[in-house]
Image (tube, rainbow, N blue to C red):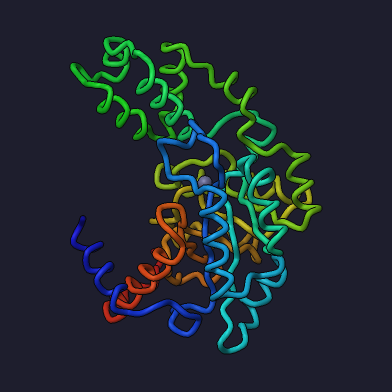
């Protein structure tokens, strides 16, 4: 275990159970992608997916400590006018517009009366395409479970003598701008992404997004097709951001909600200034845990899939307290 994790674990053990008073911010924004009891090969090699039971347990824990925002308006209102002392607001968020949100998560959330926003990439709505990382996961799954033509994979990757593990690692590290390589590998090993998408329908369709909206859920923007912003110029970052926000506006979804794909790490001051020129009221979301940002409309969320909510929030709180004297909890954009 890395030294940093050891220290955080130790501090979180001695800091006692979490309660609304010792949670450091007046809001908590958990982030999930999907919930499923079924195996999902397109996500399997990317992150852990919580089961329905694990998800419900997380929600019950969060319900004990926070008041969930009833809808988007009540959340943004709480950001503008503050929340009453002693109350902490939670906004539940999902990324990537995956279909289990409608079939699995929404019924649980409706039963518990919890609002959530799903941040969607318009490029994948109606099963038009698939996030390049999901393609990488499918490739790795095929290579690891079926007899792979190692010689062919070695020659495509340029990794002479590489084994299955090394080639899997290479595939999973593929950059957004080199994503055409994934289609090439798929073709050469007989994996048909179009067929997988057609049969498995991993994404929500436009009519399903509208159904979710009519059930009271929020649909927000998540860039056009989920690039790494670190690979893009500021103009390219703005283009994919605006294109996704414009899609939400055109289709009557949330016009002022945007979640950065992957991370907002390193996104510049200039990006935010130009984004606010066109969308002055937008709230944007990163994935850096409990942190604040020099742009107060940019809010950090807590990734929830790697452990139980109770453990994650305790660790996040401990980590925040550890860094407080070092003034490392505020992200300053340059
Ligand atoms: Zn995403």
Farthest residue, direction right:
214
Relative to residue 129, is residue 326 drawn left or right?
left
Looking at this view, is 238 or 325 the one in front?
325
Tell me where residue 60 appears, x and y as whole percent: 57, 66
Q: Residue at x 50, y 35 (%)?
A: 39
Q: Is residue 83 above or below residue 312?
A: below
Residue 323 figure quarter = bottom left
Quarter where residue 179 is shown: top left
Residue 156 image position (x, y, % from top left)? 32, 15
Quadrant of the rendered structure where residue 216 is? bottom right
Q: Nearer the viewer, residue 74 or 298?
A: 74
Picture layout, residue 137 above or below residue 84: above
The one of 226 and 25 positioned closer to us in this rendering: 25
Q: Quadrant of the N terminus?
A: bottom left
Q: State how many labels appear.
A: 0
In percent of width and height, residue 17 lies at 40, 77
Vertical arrangement, residue 210 with respect to residue 303, above or below? above
Q: Residue at position x 58%, y 48% from top?
A: 222
Question: Looking at the image, which residue sits at the far front?
Answer: 53
| Residue lying at 29% horizontally and 24% vertically, measured from the top left | 167
Residue in the picture at 32% in, 79% down:
15
Query: Which quadrant of the rendered structure holds the C terminus?
Result: bottom left
Q: Is residue 21 visible?
A: yes
Up-down: is 51 above or below 83? above
Residue 333 seen anywhere in this rendered image of the structure: no
Residue 49 position in % (x across, y down): 48, 45
């Amino acid at each position: 275990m890395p030294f940093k994790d050891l220290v955080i674990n130790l501090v979180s053990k001695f800091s006692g159970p979490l309660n609304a008073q010792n949670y450091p911010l007046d809001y908590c924004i958990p982030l999930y992608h999907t919930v499923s009891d079924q195996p999902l090969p397109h996500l399997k090699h990317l992150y852990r997916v919580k089961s329905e039971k694990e998800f419900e347990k997380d929600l019950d824990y969060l319900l004990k400590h926070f008041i969930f925002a009833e809808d988007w308006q009540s959340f943004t209102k709480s950001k503008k006018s503050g929340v009453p002392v002693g109350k902490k607001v939670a906004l539940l968020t999902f990324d990537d517009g995956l279909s289990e949100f409608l079939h699995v998560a929404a019924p649980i959330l409706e039963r518990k009366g919890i609002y959530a926003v799903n941040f969607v990439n318009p490029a994948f709505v109606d099963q038009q395409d698939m996030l390049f990382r999901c393609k990488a996961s499918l490739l790795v799954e095929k290579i690891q479970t079926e007899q792979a033509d190692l010689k062919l994979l070695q020659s495509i990757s340029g990794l002479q003598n590489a084994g299955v593990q090394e080639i899997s690692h290479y595939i999973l590290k593929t950059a957004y701008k080199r994503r055409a390589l994934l289609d090439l590998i798929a073709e050469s090993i007989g994996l048909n992404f179009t067929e997988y998408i057609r049969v498995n329908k991993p994404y929500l369709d436009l009519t399903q997004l509208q159904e979710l909206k009519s059930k009271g859920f929020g649909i927000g923007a998540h860039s056009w097709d989920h690039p790494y912003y670190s690979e893009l110029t500021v103009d390219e970052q703005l283009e994919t951001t605006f294109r996704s926000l414009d899609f939400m506006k055109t289709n009557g979804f949330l016009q002022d909600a945007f979640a950065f794909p992957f991370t907002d790490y390193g996104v510049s001051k200039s990006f935010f200034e130009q984004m606010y020129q066109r969308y002055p009221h937008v709230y944007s979301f990163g994935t850096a845990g409990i942190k604040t940002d020099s742009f107060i409309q940019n809010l950090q969320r807590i990734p929830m899939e790697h452990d139980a909510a109770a453990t994650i929030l305790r660790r996040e709180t401990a980590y925040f307290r550890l860094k407080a004297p070092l003034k490392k909890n505020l992200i300053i954009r340059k």
